[in-house]
Image: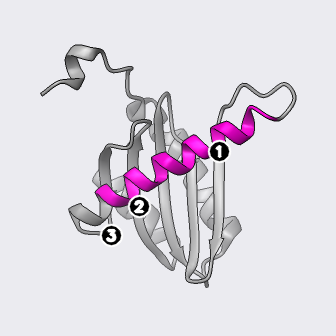
Amino acid sequence: MDWMLRDLAASVPCIRHIVVLSADGLCMAQHGSERDSGDRLAAAASGIKSLAQSIATELPGDEGDVKMVLLELTGGFFYLMSAGDRSYLAVTADAEVDPGLISQRMRDLVLRIGEHLSTGTRTPEQATP
């Protein structure tokens, strides 16, 4: 999966970090950052996903599914996109990034590898060390 993340970074100028995470915030793959930074971004992205789910349930007919979250920040952009069952793709980019291009490339990547990004529900036995 690493080469696919590198391909995304190479195809969109100004990408800083790419993280594939599970719904519970575990970093499954990353590009463009140190391991600690990828872990922090995955945990933060999981929190943002949870907040977005809470907001989605307030919309009529919505079951709380999060398809995409976009944050425009002073220093750039944060994108979070559903990438399979209980998996997400998170990307940070500089302010100069083309927002349409990055959304399209993320969607393309999710379609190419979505089934490989799916994570199953954890059982209590798997959660304990």
Compared across the picture, whether 57 is left or right of 129 comes to right
Which quadrant of the figure contains the C terminus? top left
Compared across the picture, whether 8 is left or right of 66 comes to left
Q: Earlier in the sequence, mark 3 or mark 2?
A: 2
Can residue 67 be seen in this snapshot? Answer: no
The amino acid on which the numbered mark 2 sits, given as a three-letter code, is Ile
The amino acid on which the numbered mark 1 sits, given as a three-letter code, is Ala
Q: Which residues are magenta?
A: 39-58
Q: Which residue is mark 3?
A: 32
3 and 2 marks in contact (CB < 8 Å): yes
Q: Which residue is mark 2?
A: 18
* Element assignment for label 2: strand
Residue 30: x %, y % from top left: 32, 57
- Residue visible at 46% across and 46% down in the picture: 46
- Residue visible at 40% across and 67% down in the picture: 17
Number of marks drawn: 3
Q: CA distance from mark 1 to mark 3?
A: 25 Å
Q: Nearer the viewer, residue 55 or 91?
A: 55
Q: Main secondary structure of the magenta part?
A: helix
The amino acid on which the numbered mark 3 sits, given as a three-letter code, is Gly
Q: Which residue is mark 1?
A: 52
Q: Earlier in the sequence, mark 1 or mark 3?
A: 3
Q: Is residue 50 magenta?
A: yes
